[in-house]
Image (spheres, grey):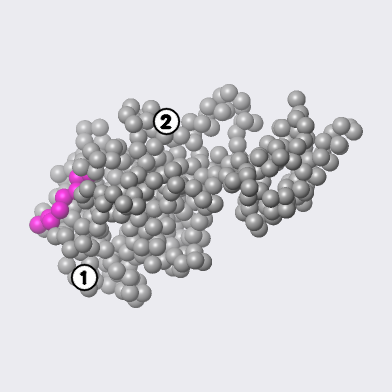
Amino acid sequence: MTATSDDIVITGVGLAVPGLGGAADLLGAPSGTDGFDPATGLTGREMRNKDRASRLALHCAHTALRDAGLVDADGYTGDRDTTAVVVSSNLGTLEGLCQAVDTIAEQTVVGLSPLGLPGTSSNVVAGWVAIRYGLRGPNLTVCNGATSGLDALYWARNLIAAGRAGAAVVVGVEPANEAVTRMLGRPSTDVAAALVLEPARTAAARAADGRATIGRYARTADLAGAVAAATGGAEAIGLRLTGADLEARLGPCSGALGVLQVAAAAAHLSGGGRGPVLATTGGAPEDDAAAALVLTACGH
Amino acid sequence: MAENLDIEDLRAMLAQTLELPLAEIGDESHFTEELEMDSLMSLEIASNLESRYAITIRDTDFAQARTLVQLHDLVAAKIEERSAA
């Protein structure tokens, strides 16, 4: 499929998944070298006093922006006024909130630390990413259950298509911590992925490579309905990403899942893999909905 | 019970709050220009100092102290004020 001027494409991909290097590692066995290590990757001045989800997000957002050619030594080189940040996270602020509630119960509000306050905001991750790069476009968090990650891609795409944003950084993130493990009833994992979305014409104007084009999306009560609506029932699918394989390898990915799947799709398509790619999330008995998103290769 | 003032305790508190190695907190390191202290970190430090030394630090007082040595002088003066009262 050839990209048209109205298409919205992915121009940058970044991951923060322990042991994995790049998005291609999501498609098969990790290359094993230079994999992400939270012990060293989440430190540094820009990470100080931030909750773990924000640190993971800042790490992968930087990789994605660098991949897109949108950062240099002075920071973000795109249009700061019109760049959006859209984050998907279901459990990212759980630990901060639990700690705040515990502290209030034990010591009243005088025991609260000012530094912990931002971590109790459900939009904290999107806020820190915007502050780090001076991004003043729309800024929001999608906290929408199983479909959250694909929903975030859809909303970011819509912000650009509607002219509300000129580009968007989309992050899906879930941190590993005790509160999340208690909530899930099984060990949690650090998982985060970031994508940079731009209109195809903007990417072409600055000679940036499009990795994949965002195609049709649907969110319905059941998986079959979402798939039928997103594919139109007609297109032959080159690769199906249900998320089950990723969660089997990485553990529960929750709100990060859809963004990780799209990162994998971008790696598949930009590596010459057969398209289109169909990513689906949700649809299990415990989920309230299912979402499907089609991604196609970028034309040159 | 308020603690006795020791500049090394202040250095350790700054290092912990700013998440920086102890060695980076020099006596004359500028809080904002060199250590990149922001307003939330300032609030945290002021609030820690208040409870540790049983003193009251106004925002305007804290804004005058821009290095470890100046902060030490500020806290010492506040402890003096408290003892005199």
What kind of secondary structure does the magenta stretch mostly adopt? Answer: loop
Query: Mark 1 to mark 2: distance in Å?
Result: 45 Å
Location of mark 1 (residue)? A299
- Tell if the residue under mark 1 belongs to the same chain as the one under mark 2: yes
Can you see residue A23? yes
Badge 1 amino acid: Gly
User: Which tag is nearer the camera, tag 1 or tag 2?
Assistant: 2
Q: Is residue B78 magenta?
A: no
The C terminus of chain A, quarter of image:
bottom left
As drawn, the residue found furthest toward the right would be B84
Q: Name the residue nearer the viewer: A274 or B59.
A: A274
Q: In this view, does B30 lie above or below B6?
A: below
The residue wearing badge 2 is: A178
Q: What stretch is highlighted in magenta?
A: A236-243
Kind of residue at badge 2? Glu
At a point 50% along the width and 56% down the height, the residue shown is: A132
On the question of residue A142 being in view, the answer is no
SS assignment at label 2: helix
Judging from the image, mark 1 belongs to the subunit labelled: A
* Residue A247, percent from left and from top: 25, 40
